[in-house]
Image (cartoon, rainbow, N blue to C red):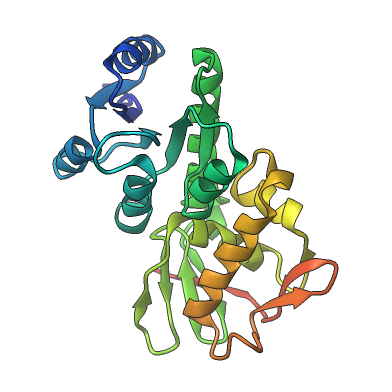
Amino acid sequence: MTTETPPVSLLLVDDEASLRQPLAEYLQGQGFAVTQAESAARARSLLLEQSPDLVLLDIMMPGEDGLSLCRHLVETHGVPVILLTARGEPTDRIVGLEIGADDYVTKPFEPRELVARIRSVLRRAARGNGRELATDAEDSAYAFEGWTLDPLKRRLTDPEGAVVSISTAEFRMLRAFLDHPKQVLDRDRLLDMVQGREANLFDRAVDNQISRLRRKIEVDRSDPQFIQTVRGGGYRFGATVERVRTG
């Protein structure tokens, strides 16, 4: 007896019905299960009942805007987010990526490009959640100086055993360092690992994410022992990292 794999579920949040409804029909034709929300408030209500695999989120909406909802999604749901924006200013896109969005698409866009972006983000999310780890590493976590990062549960634990809350973007950034300890990683390479698109445009996003990580794992942010700044080169994770069994 075979079991069918359920379709990837998307939550499409956009107040423009003339765009939202045809786009939902197109995405359904591509094999996705799509739920629509016309506002951030409606999206929040739906999220109490379901857990989508990815959220497509318009930035400019009446009431709560997309950036505010994106921040909520990243901090509380850990779901991948692609921003849909009519704005052309790089600042708006930078802010979205800084708060944890996985990608953005500028309106008007080609639906086929959006589908490609969705699949790319889902692949990165799968890697980030540990789904593509080798068999002998599936149940292993990263350990450094008493800290532990479990990639399957995406859980960071401090030396006292307390769970430290981290966003999706912070998790990906930390894992990038833990996969390459003692190596100098420049901003372009870091952004390629955690965002995967137009990395050179968003150097500031790296600095802000690292600043947030330092607040959570460093004893003295003015003299960081883990995420160290390399002048003219980028950043380096200074601690020794081991892989330990979690089971």
**Quadrant position of the N terminus in the picture:** top left
Towards the viewer: 246 or 224: 224
- Which residue is painted at 37% across and 84% down in the image? 161
Task: Identify whether 126 is placed above or below 98.
Answer: above
Q: Is residue 113 left or right of residue 80?
A: right
Where residue 193 appears, as percent x and y from the top left, is 65, 50
Toward the right, the furthest residue is 232
Where residue 58 appears, as percent x and y from the top left, is 38, 32
Where residue 210 appears, as percent x and y from the top left, is 59, 68
- Which residue is painted at 60% across and 46% down in the image? 195
Where residue 189 appears, as percent x and y from the top left, is 74, 53
Q: Is residue 164 left or right of residue 192?
A: left
Q: Total number of numbered labels?
A: 0
Task: Identify whether 124 is placed above or below 14.
Answer: below
Q: Is residue 137 left or right of residue 77?
A: right
**Is residue 33 visible in the rendered structure shown here?**
yes
- Which residue is painted at 37% across and 53% down in the image? 71
Residue 10: quadrant of the picture: top left
Q: Is residue 205 left or right of residue 87?
A: right
**Quadrant position of the C terminus in the picture:** bottom left
Task: Identify whether 133 is placed above or below 158.
Answer: above
Residue 163: quadrant of the picture: bottom left
- Which residue is painted at 33% across and 24% down in the image? 7
**Is residue 2 visible in the rendered structure shown here?**
no
Towards the viewer: 238 or 111: 111
Towards the viewer: 143 or 48: 48
